[in-house]
Amino acid sequence: MTKVANVILQAENIVARYGPVEVLHGINLNVKEGEIVSLLGSNGAGKTTLLNCICGLHSSKEGKVRFRGEEITKVPAELVVSRGMAHVPERRQIFSTMTVEDNLWLGASHRMPKTSKKEIAKEMETVYQRFPILAERKWQMGGTLSGGQQQMLAIGRALLSRPQLLLLDEPSLGLAPLIAKEILTIVQEIRAEWGTTVLLVEQNARAALAISDRAYVLSTGTVMLEGTSEEIMNDPRVQSAYLGHAHEAV
């Protein structure tokens, strides 16, 4: 008998507002352990707001978020991290006046003192092996790195929190095509090597669908489509709106 993966994340009827404006209108979403799930949609569809509601950065007005079976709807973002969820926000948001190494240490800060500095340093070496350019530049200020290197740093910082679920918001935004492709390949490798489940918001729909198992398509704050990545890729509406050519942004 094939083992059915456990659902690690459930978002149920999520409603969110900015002031009087409702931007999410009852979103339902689930992610199973070990999956890469893409969240697609045009600018303003509500993708980033949904990620922020899931990780506690934005309060939903209605609905529930369950992580590993436990409701976390009102749990502060810093405590959500300690429960095994990490968020790499849009435009990275690293600390530009801190060194690469200090940025990485911050990723593991909530694990201390339960986890020794020696153990975290060992894990940091694993991150440096995954991102050799960061090892070469560990004493540089974060703000002096290229956009692609800053994205690697943001992902490495998140990995040092030892997440079971990684939320990635537009990891290829503003990057050259070859660097963007490298970043998305790294996402696949993180799932394979670290066993990390990934919920991915990505501007390049074709590239996102190529590495994900399933996808949701948002339109003006509602789920327009959901299914396997192959089903979404082959849907005429998606092809027309988002897959007109290989570098179409969503």
Image (cartoon, helix red, strand yellow):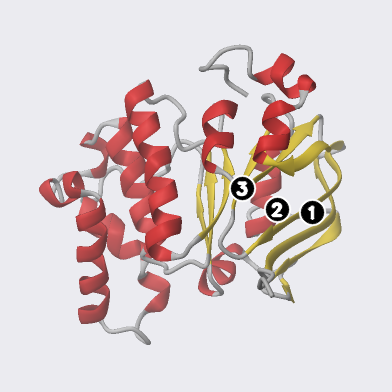
Q: Amino acid at mark 1?
A: Ser
Q: Amino acid at mark 2?
A: Cys
Q: Amino acid at mark 3?
A: Asp
Helix, strand or loop under label 2: helix
Q: Measure the C-alpha gap from mark 3 to mark 1.
A: 27 Å
Q: Measure the C-alpha gap from mark 3 to mark 2.
A: 22 Å
Q: Which class describes the residues within 10 Å of circle 3: few (<14), some (14-19), or many (20+)? A: some
Q: Earlier in the sequence, mark 2 or mark 1?
A: 2
Q: Which class describes the residues within 10 Å of circle 2: few (<14), some (14-19), or many (20+)? A: many
Residue 60's disc is: 1
Q: Residue furthest bottom?
A: 114
In this rendering, the label closer to the viewer, 3 or 1: 3
| Left or right position of 102 against 233 | left
**Residue pictured at 70% horizontal, 53% vertical:** 53
| Left or right position of 245 against 146 | right
For label 3, the residue is 213
